[in-house]
Amino acid sequence: MKKQYDPRMHSAEHILNQTMVRLFATDRSFSAHIEKKKSKCDYRFDRKLMDEEIRKIEQKVNEIIGADMPVTEEYLSKEAAEKRYSLTRLPDDAKGDIRIVRVGNYDTSPCIGPHVKSTKEIGDFHIVSASFSNGILRIRYKLSQPE
């Protein structure tokens, strides 16, 4: 049985990943566990986050959510996608055209999961905890219901 991602949480993951890239020049998460109630993303990092950095991440993610950006998709040949994106998080058996998900003008990445149509559908983003161990930063987050 294929894993079923929650579209709101999965779309928030994309925004969180791009926020980490922009604020800390890190790669996107190398591992994620996306659930409806609470999710987590793991990043290769060199330290724990300071409280003000956690607040800054939350603020930026919520700013993008509040901007009501469209979430769209396009398809690229696998060869074209490999030139522009890392395909390491896609299943090994991914063949043919690769689906690229775009969150407004903020994030673009290959993805097979379901997404909202607009960031306003996500709800407020809140980091529940952030921990650091052995070069891995883990961010756990939850969402409130959109208004």
Image: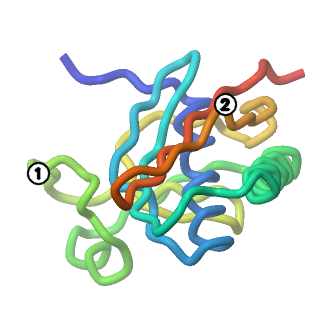
Callout in the foreground (1, 2)? 2
Give the number of the disc on residue 92: 1
Q: Alpha-carbon neighbours of circle 2 within 10 Å: few (<14), some, or many (≥20)?
A: some
The answer to which image quadrant residue 56 occupies is bottom right
Q: How is the image coloured?
A: rainbow
Q: Secondary structure at mark 1?
A: loop
Which sits earlier in the primary sequence, circle 1 or circle 2?
A: 1
Residue type at mark 2 is Val
The answer to which image quadrant residue 112 occupies is top left
Residue at the location (34% across, 68% down)?
Answer: 76
Q: Which residue is more in the foreground, 29 or 145? A: 29
Vertical placement of 72 versus 128: above or below? below
Residue 137, how many percent across, how many down? 47, 53
Residue at the location (53% across, 65% down)?
Answer: 108
Left or right: residue 138 compared with residue 112: right
Q: Residue farthest to the left?
A: 93
According to the picture, the residue beneath numbered tag 2 turns out to be 128
Residue type at mark 1 is Asp
- Mark 1 touches mark 2? (CB < 8 Å): no
Residue 30, how many percent across, how many down? 34, 55
Left or right: residue 91 compared with residue 32: left
Residue 2, how many percent across, how many down? 23, 23
Q: Secondary structure at mark 2?
A: strand
Residue 96, how many percent across, how many down? 17, 58
Q: Alpha-carbon neighbours of circle 1 within 10 Å: few (<14), some, or many (≥20)?
A: few
The answer to which image quadrant residue 123 occupies is top right
Residue at the location (66% across, 31% down)?
Answer: 128
Q: Point out the image quarter for the N terminus.
A: top left
Q: What is the distance, in whole Å, between disc 1 and disc 2 at their CAs?
A: 32 Å
Residue at the location (51% across, 24% down)?
Answer: 6
Q: Which residue is more in the foreground, 132 or 36? A: 132
